[in-house]
Image (spheres, rainbow, N blue to C red):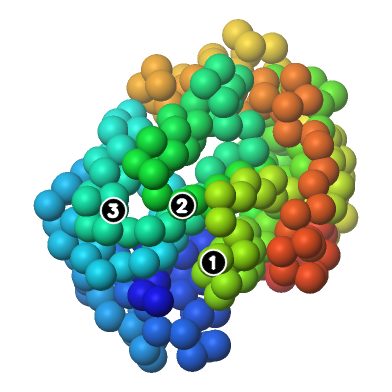
């Protein structure tokens, strides 16, 4: 069985690559820049971007199982994904493991969740087997939400999110790649052990970092206005703001036991992630 992974220069793909190498599992890394690929035993490196169909097809020739870590946020990310999925099918890939989103749906409130849904649909349409890892928001990102003034601002109301650690997503992906036949055509909802509000998240960051952090409930108008300083394109502003409105509506509050079911290990809490960072 030949395994290929994308995203090896990033957080989740990189953690999977290191875990596979540590276990002595040979695999291929498909990266945009070969000079940035980690040097790991038992690996080979191929260069391709999601948007380059021919390079992607060549990079995936002979691959049986592919870990497709979703691409960087971009206005044309869905088209990039569709191109890469088509190249994988043409190359003869039999099974795609894709990092999706917990709220993936055609009408997801979190706007980028719609792209994940469409990518899932593209994978299904090829006839390739799939395993979808529907990640909740990342616990690792919580501290990045804190502004320089120590305030998390957003229109999340009193909603909660069952955010998951990137390390747990990587552990699930590694377990799936170790025995892909056990996870054929399965969809896993990857969450942390509890759902937390942004007020609770702020309190945890305060306690762990020893500084005052609070949460301010913005209105929608306030949210767009406070982010205008970065002059985002409209799609990016919508993505940023809908991160919070998806939390507000409760779409991300359900806690799943899938991390522990797949890995045999309880998922990390925000406190665990902050202490590990």
Which residue is labeled 2 in the image?
Answer: 129
At 39% from the left edge and 17% from the top edge, which residue is drawn?
234
Which residue is labeled 1 in the image?
Answer: 180
CA gap between label 3 and label 2 equals 12 Å
**Which of the two labelled residues, at mark 3 and mark 2, occupies the earlier sequence position?**
3
Q: Nearer the viewer, residue 12 or 65?
A: 65
Quadrant into which the C terminus falls = bottom right
Looking at the image, can residue 28 be seen? yes
CA gap between label 3 and label 1 equals 17 Å
Badge 3 element: helix
Checking the image for residue 212, the label placed there is none
Question: In the rendered view, does 64 fall on the left or right side of 255?
Answer: left
Query: Disc 3 or disc 2, which is closer to the eye?
Result: 2
Q: Quadrant of residue 19?
A: bottom right
Number of dots carrying numbers: 3
Bin the neighbour count of mark 1 within 10 Å (Cα to Cα): few under 14, some 14-19, many 20 and up. Answer: many
Give the image location of residue 13, x and y in percent. 46, 64
Give the image location of residue 186, x and y in percent. 61, 50
Say whether marks 1 and 2 touch (CB < 8 Å): yes
């Amino acid at each position: 069985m030949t395994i290929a992974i994308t995203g090896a220069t990033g957080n989740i793909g990189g953690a999977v690559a290191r875990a596979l190498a540590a276990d002595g599992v040979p695999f291929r890394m498909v990266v945009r820049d070969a000079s940035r690929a980690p040097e790991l035993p038992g690996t080979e490196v191929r260069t391709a971007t999601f948007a380059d169909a021919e390079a992607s097809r060549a990079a995936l020739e002979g691959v049986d199982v592919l870990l497709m870590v979703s691409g960087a946020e971009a206005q044309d990310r869905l088209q990039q994904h569709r191109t890469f999925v088509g190249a994988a099918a043409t190359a003869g890939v039999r099974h795609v493991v894709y990092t999706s989103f917990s709220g993936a749906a055609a009408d997801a409130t979190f706007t980028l969740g719609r792209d994940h849904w469409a990518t899932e649909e593209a994978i299904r349409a090829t006839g390739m087997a799939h395993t979808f890892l529907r990640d909740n928001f990342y616990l690792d990102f919580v501290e990045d939400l804190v502004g320089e003034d120590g305030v998390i601002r957003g229109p999340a109301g009193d909603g909660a999110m069952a955010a998951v650690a990137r390390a747990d997503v990587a552990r699930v992906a590694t377990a799936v790649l170790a025995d892909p036949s056990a996870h054929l055509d399965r969809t896993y909802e990857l969450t942390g052990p509890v759902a937390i509000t942004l007020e609770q998240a702020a309190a945890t960051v305060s306690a762990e970092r020893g500084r005052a952090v609070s949460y301010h409930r913005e209105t929608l108008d306030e949210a767009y206005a406070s982010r205008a300083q970065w002059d985002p394109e409209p799609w990016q502003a919508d993505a940023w703001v809908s991160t919070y409105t998806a939390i507000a509506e409760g779409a991300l509050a359900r806690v799943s036991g899938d991390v522990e079911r797949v890995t045999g290990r309880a998922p990390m809490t925000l406190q665990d992630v902050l202490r590990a960072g």
